[in-house]
Amino acid sequence: MYGYNRLAGAWIPLWIPSNGLNILPSYIDYFHLTPATTGLNTASLWIGGCIAGVTWGKVTDVIGRRPALFWAAILSLIAVALQTAAQNITMFVIARIVLGFGINASGLSGPAYLAETLPLHWRGWGLGLFNDLYYVGGTTWTLLDSLAGGLIAAGVTYGTSFMESTWAWRIPSLIQGVFSILCIVIIPFIPKSPRWLLFQGRREEAHQVLAQTYSNGDLASTVVLSQLKEIEDTFEYEKNAGETLSVTQIFKTRTARKRVLLAISVAVFSSVAGNVIAAYYLGSMLTNAGITNTTRQLQINIILNAFCLICSVLGTYYIDSWGRKMTTVISTVLLTIFLFLVGALTKVFGNSNNTSGVYGTVAMIFLSQGAYSFGWTPVLFLYPPEVLNYPIRANGMGVFQFFLNGAGLLIILTMPIALFIIGWKTYMINGAWDIVMLIVILYYWIETKGKTLEEIDELIEGKKHSDVPDLEQIIREEARVEKEKH
């Protein structure tokens, strides 16, 4: 059960081989794609995501986090069937909108579920891996990364690229459904969110889940009892303060608005930081850099995903020691530097036959994506559910998803045009924006590492709503006592 708590969320959504498809000649030729229709095909995911953002939060609150994940997987599976069978661009776009809805529904419910269910010392790892595993291929939603490639996605797309029929792109589309099926099979066997259970008045079930995740089933554990009381005290305070699960709650108070703005900042910044260029238009980037061969582009895509996976897991490893804020700052500083270098090298060597210059540009593309993956990939779905308290967590994640998709939609529609018209200058503009973004993060973000979801209230509201000592302090004390016994 404990293992499922850590991993189930990472399986919830789907793999979407978008950047690989955008390289395939059979895909481009079948739909007679232009820069505008390429953007539409890709952006259709964000359209569905925006719809999910404004509707699925309430569903998640009413039926629960676990059932919401289940039905999101069902919707995604239906969309996979439609996309695989697409006969024209209209059918393909409709399928992608439904797929975007299902994936974003998972991306809304999944982080809320993991944040509320994982024990304190595994929350960083669990929610970090939720997004990291997209590079493997069957991971979280990440519409800004949008599961855009993944090792499986990149590998399968490379393998089918040698086919001349439409199965070159239909097979990668079909294989997406494997991960939805896995979710549908696994979800009934994972526990429900203890915080959702407690809010519904199901105290004994909540107690049982906390014992499973914190102490291998020991209901009398001091850590378990302390966490249970801390949640109960906080819920009692919130109910007495008149906080409800309504959508309007996210706007009612200054602290609620601050929480939502923190979540929105993650959504917008992660979308415009610079990775979307490679996530969906790697082919255009490589063409601008002087690498035009399709096979070579697909091979680079596979290697890039492997590299990004390593970087994202490394960032997740440090996220609890360095903190969410500092990890993101380091990631953004490095990304900014590398984006400027990509722009400069593309300007100088993009249309040249200088092999060293061309591969130097590719190296900078790799480093920029690695820098993004180190911080933004694990932080994306970790930070928002941490700063949103229970009454606004599901609906707040809906707002987060809406802005994430809205920003992604804007970038996806404009990026192919920008790359086509201004080329290397696109990277320079992106780097300049990242500097502004960095200043806001340093000034506005709070640090949430080492705090339970209820203890984060003190950082935002100025006070904790329970007299229970901080859980990390209790865990350390228990570890000290246990060490002295041995």
Image: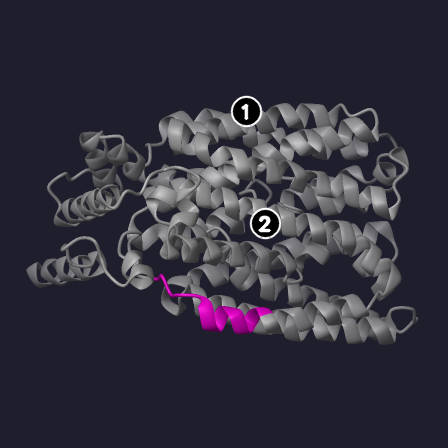
* Residue under the image location 47 percent in, 45 percent down: 397
Q: Which residues are magenta?
A: 437-449
Position of 245 with respect to 25 (left or right) is left
* Residue under the image location 39 percent in, 48 percent down: 252
Question: Type of residue at label 1?
Answer: Ile
Seen in the picture, residue 424 relative to 211 is either above or below; the reply is below
* Residue under the image location 46 percent in, 31 percent down: 69
From the top left corner, tell me how far across and down residue 271 is, in percent: 62, 56
Q: Quadrant of the N terminus?
A: top left
For label 2, the residue is 404
Q: Does the magenta segment cover residue 448?
A: yes
Question: Type of residue at label 2?
Answer: Leu
For disc 2, the neighbor class at 10 Å (few under 14, some 14 to 19, many from 20) is: many
Q: Quadrant of the C terminus?
A: bottom left
Position of 478 with respect to 104 (left or right) is left
The dot on residue 74 is 1
From the top left corner, tell me how far across and down residue 111 is, in percent: 44, 44
Q: CA distance from mark 2 to mark 1?
A: 23 Å
Seen in the picture, residue 345 relative to 461 is either above or below; the reply is below
Circle 2 SS class:
helix
Q: Does the magenta segment cover residue 126?
A: no
Position of 238 with respect to 171 (left or right) is left
Considering depth in this image, is 392 or 434 the residue closer to the camera? 392
